[in-house]
Image (spheres, grey):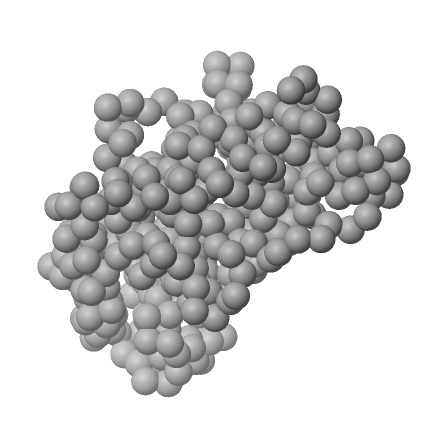
Amino acid sequence: MSDTPTAYQGPKRIFSGMQPTGRLHLGNYLGALKNWVAMQDEDESERIYCVVDMHAVTMPHDAKALPDAVRRVTAAYLAAGLDPEKNVIFAQSAVPAHAELAWILNCVARLGWAERMTQFKDKGGKDRERVSVGLLTYPVLMAADILVYKATHVPVGDDQKQHLELCRDVAARFNRDFGDGEAVFPITEPLIQGPGARIMSLRDGTAKMSKSDPSDNSRINLEDDADTIARKIKKAKTDPEPLPDSIDGLDGRPEASNLVGIFAALTGGSKASVLAEYGGQGFGAFKPALAEVAVEYLAPISDEYRRLIAEPAEIDRILKKGAERARAVAEPVIAEAKAAIGFWG
């Protein structure tokens, strides 16, 4: 076995996914889904997107509600504009190779690597001995999600960069230990998100907009109707000062900066251009303008989302077809990995 495997030679392939926990929101759309949709027409690579329901069970969950949660995330993918003919869209648990490769990679990764992951520290908290082993090995399963398709690129935000680094470490070690001079897996590269990738909470401008925030008023969900969007923006936390005339004036004003950033992302402008128009005005004038922009922007998505949710059979058909396509890619990879480590048969 060589210590320096040859470089991976294979097609460019993009992989990503979202958990079916909570409702997908404006931050998910602007930070990820919008870019996924753009790539399907601008990038010639293969694209694979799943709903990562295996990750969802690492924490306490409602088993009876999980299938519908998977459908909701799938509906959001489709409503945002992901074409199931141009992209592979499926539920993670429908492809057994994810779990098979995860076990193999668990035996390649090192305990210290997993224990260093900040997400485990954050979710485990002070009572780590009571959390599931799955939460500890979550990043290894994420590595398996990526590598079972030999994905060369993964769109990532700041909160997932550490997990992608672990994936790269696992792939490199597997290649070195079992590749016999050949790179079985690619060293996956990040696709850095573009403008609008970091949308903050409407209740706290220092915290990222999150599905897990207990306050529904902290986020604009993709399924929210016009009245709900307007109400949430009206209630969004601000400060008493008017909007500044320049970006420098947003320093130390996280809530103001967030709302200006959302306006810019929805209109395709910049914070500077928004302030050129609204600088000096109070939030009593700016919030209604932002609500109007948000409602107009999200209406087609929310309308299509509600149509899809009313047709679960259509969603299930898309998921089934996507799983078949995903298995066709993953099964030869898991067979190669098994042979590399010496499994019988």
Q: Is residue 156 visible?
A: no
- Taking depth in this image into account, of 173 and 237 the one nearest to the observer is 173
Residue at image x 72%, y 29%?
340
**Image x and y of residue 315, in percent:** 24, 44
Say which quarter of the image contains residue 225. bottom left
Direction front: furthest residue = 345
Direction top: furthest residue = 130
Residue at image x 69%, y 36%?
170
Quadrant location of the C terminus in the rendered image: top right
Q: Is residue 207 positioned above or below 117 on the image?
A: below
Direction bottom: furthest residue = 276
**Image x and y of residue 143, in percent:** 59, 37
- Taking depth in this image into account, of 125 and 196 the one nearest to the observer is 196
- Taking depth in this image into account, of 184 and 252 the one nearest to the observer is 184
Q: Is residue 58 visible?
A: yes
Quadrant location of the N terminus in the rendered image: top right
